[in-house]
Amino acid sequence: MTDSETRTAPAVSGVEIVLDAVTKRYPGQHDPAVDAVSMTIPAGEIVVLVGPSGCGKTTTMRMINRLIEPTSGTVTIDGRDAAGIDADQLRRGIGYSIQQAGLFPHMTVAKNIATVPGLIGWDRARIAARTDEMLELVGLDPGIYRRRYPRQLSGGQQQRVGVARALAADPPILLMDEPFGAVDPITRGLLQDELLRLQAELGKTIVFVTHDFNEAVKLGDRIAVLGDHSRILQYDRPAAILADPADDTVAGFAGSDAALKQLTLTRIREVPLGECATVSADASVEVARTVAAEWSRVLVLDTGGRPLRWIAGADLAHADSLHEARSAPVETLSAESTLQEALAALLGDRNATAVVTGSHGEYTGLVTIDTLVGHLAALRTANGSGEGTAADVPA
């Protein structure tokens, strides 16, 4: 069973997209850029187009909102032929997020987000309320960020604003063209988690382009592995592709560590978590010593239950307050992080332990090496008994 099947299903607000023999030919070129692509993108799912650079995946995606007009074939959106819809109207009903956010540099964050709602005639009060709602949705404080300009934001913040802008008019479809490709790996993982959290709430139809197969496995309800001219080599659930690649080319994308990539199919929130001793930052050192009596260290939490730092029991012995006690930083993971990301974090921690946080950054438990070993053992047992194998994933 894939993660997309075990997560709580959101109320679907997306619509079905059908590509039927969609082809794009450019004058003067013998071969088509996209050759007769046919696929159905179910409503409310994330479908990832993955393939090598130049294979035509971005061209394929842009033909959905007619930024590139198909030479032949049809794109049907919610039962309507996209060619029969006014192009501007079509695009205003489809969110679009690209690499490096594509924000207008001369506009504030608020005005960037308000672009499409303004074009379709929303009044100022509604736009202002929606702008703040979108900023909160992507984890940015409206009071801090609405008046800033793109140059005053980090790369990750710009991408969050780009997603907020794409969602501002509540479109049923979101097209994302390598939106996280220009940020560092840590920020990229956080943005991926944020997208999954948003999708769990919103249920949009998302078409996501990437050349990173790991990203495709993490995000996709389904993955379309594309070859030259966007020819579909395999279109299936991530677990099915990892377990049974259609050919050597697909197997090359999956990689020799395909078994390890199975860890990408499970979120931390799906496995049992461990516990540790915790104490509030405003607690007395005496209370902390009592709590730490049966533990080697304690986790200090702020008033909102968010982890601040570790303090070893030995360092509490002679401290007059928690503030004075020597402490160590906390390695945290989102509940939406995958077990593969957890493994990478654990290998970098001297205690092979990471703190798991919820949607508001609050402490929810610990993930350890034993957590991963237990999960892999359960998978081996299930596969050995013929139950729950990747090949059994229903369409």
Image (cartoon, rainbow, N blue to C red):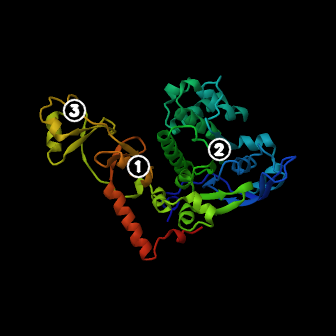
Amino acid carrying mark 3 in the image: Arg
Q: Residues within 10 Å of mark 1 (few under 14, many from 20)?
A: few
Q: For the residues marked 1 and 2, what is the alpha-carbon distance in whole angstroms?
A: 26 Å
Q: Residue at x 47, y 63 (%)?
A: 259
Measuring from the top left, give residue 203's x and y in whole percent: 58, 51
Q: For the residues marked 2 and 3, what is the alpha-carbon distance in whole angstroms?
A: 45 Å
Residue under pointer 2: 177
Direction left: furthest residue: 318
Is residue 194 something one can see in this rendering? yes
| 304 or 341: nearer the viewer | 341
Q: Residues within 10 Å of mark 2 (few under 14, many from 20)?
A: many
Q: For the residues marked 1 and 3, what is the alpha-carbon distance in whole angstroms?
A: 26 Å
Tell me if 257 is positioned left or right of 366 in this view: right
Return the disc, 1 or 2, that comes first in the chain's sequence: 2
Return the disc, 1 or 3, that comes first in the chain's sequence: 3
Dots 1 and 2: beta carbons under 8 Å? no
Q: Is residue 355 above or below residue 222?
A: above
Q: Residue at x 51, y 60 (%)?
A: 256
Tag count in the figure?
A: 3
Amino acid carrying mark 2 in the image: Asp
Is residue 122 something one can see in this rendering? no
Measuring from the top left, give residue 93's x and y in whole percent: 71, 43
Tell me if 193 is positioned left or right of 179 in this view: left
Residue under pointer 3: 326
Return the disc, 2 or 3, that comes first in the chain's sequence: 2
Q: Which mark is residue 344?
A: 1
Amino acid carrying mark 1 in the image: Ala
Provide the secondary structure element on which disc 3 rests: loop
Measuring from the top left, give residue 212's x and y in whole percent: 57, 50
Q: Residue at x 69, y 50 (%)?
A: 57
